[in-house]
Image: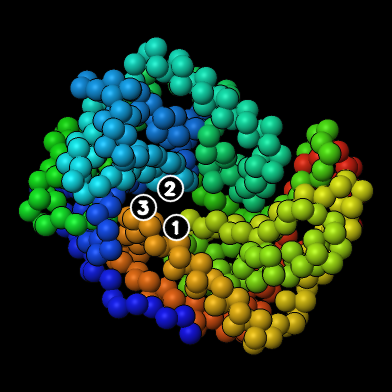
Amino acid sequence: MTAIRSRPPRVNKYVGDNGVTILQQNNPTSRAFCIGVWVNTGSRDEVTGEEGLCHFVEHMIFKGTANRSAFQISKEIEKVGGSLEAFTTREQICFYAHVLEDHKSLAADVLQDMILNPLFPADQLTLERQVVLEEISDVMDAPDDWIHDLFAANVFPDHPLGKPILGSPETVSGFGRAKLSSFSRRHFRPDNIVISVYGNIDKRSLMRLCDWKFPDASGRVRRNGRRIGRYRPARRLYKKSLHHQHICIGGRCCSYVDEQRYPLMVLTTLLGGTMSSRLFQRIREELGFTYSIYTYSDSVRDTGLMGTYVAVRPSNARRVVGEVFKEFAKIRGGDLGPQELEDTKQHLKGKILLGLEGSTSKMMRMARSDFYFGRQMSERELIQKINEVTLDDIVELAQDVLDEDRSTVVSLGPSSLQNAYH
């Protein structure tokens, strides 16, 4: 049993006078202070022609406000030893600052200025568009990254969940200042924002820190309500002159809020999440066919995908795909013992707890719990959910997600389709 220390400080939840949801937890171990501004809009909310807009807005928010230049935005946080970051997912955009608690007011002020007063200056827009286009090119030049976009496109065809978060050169090239300004007005509003704070601050100071003056907003935040559609397994080859064949095998799986998420976490770890996992041991250690092989999952509020990635010599592609499916079949057939399950759960629990040690991780956990569960899921509850996973749970899940006939196989490289699959 993984030991969990004494209960952490409670997570406080407030709604400010401006309508913003505020989450806060004290930091009992250090003076670190992390504040994140989460916008509950992501790439899945983009409509045709907007692919990459959320990510581009995320970039442009850093490029100057009515009060600060792009240089000043970075310099003010960095000169006190802090950091200022952002990222875009399929369902949220997050901007966050990590500073010492002495500088919490500065961090909040810079974030407020960025969110409420962006200028989207024309000269910076042109420069940053080139930066994003280079980012897209970098992904397409890195087959071990690109294959995952191709895989998602086949698991969720003709749906925003299957589109790259970065967008395409065509869509990004069409984004102008008016579109960015319209996006920020529609989405950067109190009822669509959560401010998550991990650090020491009393309630009165916290409410004052987050008392931002949002412009008036009317109507509801627009969501892309396109139906996901029925899953159809696919076999796709994308020919490209490469030294290796890059392959993803998998399909759809459960959502972030589904109780099957906990058996899924165990299954992906057991199958290809560690150096001692089944696929790593079989494909790399026993057969020597690959340097990199792993299994992963990516869930959103109503669905998800699970994939196994491997890079091999083109001549070995067919053999490796067959070996992966053999390992799938073993688990589906119940070839799994209690000790292997227990070892996998112990690894997973340790990894989760270590991953939650940092201030940034704590801030993110609070926000995601609120978005997906409407409450805080404690570390104790998460560990308990994993403890409760049984052998039958794993086999039952494997019947669905490891079924060869229901698996999508996507391949990128020089090998022909006939050579790549059996």
315 to the left or right of 192: right
- What residue appears at the point 60 percent right and 76 percent down from the top-left corner? 344
Q: Which kind of residue does numbered mark 3 sit on? A: Thr
Compared with 277, 195 (above or below) is: above
- Going from N to C along the chain, the mark reached first, 1 or 2, is 2
Q: Which mark is residue 301?
A: 1
Give residue 54's position: percent from left, percent from top: 43, 35
332 vs 76: above or below = below
Amino acid at pointer 2: Glu
Secondary structure at badge 1 equals loop
Between 268 and 169, the one lying in front of the other is 268
- Measured as percent of width and height from the top left, residue 354 is found at 45, 65
Cα separation between marks 1 and 3: 22 Å
Q: Can see residue 376?
A: yes
> Is the residue 59 above or below the residue 405 in the image?
above
Mark 1–mark 2 contact, CB under 8 Å? yes
Q: Which corner quadrant holds the C terminus?
A: bottom right
Between disc 1 and disc 3, the foreground one is 3
Say which mark, if any, is on residue 91: 2
Badge 1 or badge 3: first in the primary sequence: 1
- Residue 301 lies left or right of residue 18; in this view the side is right
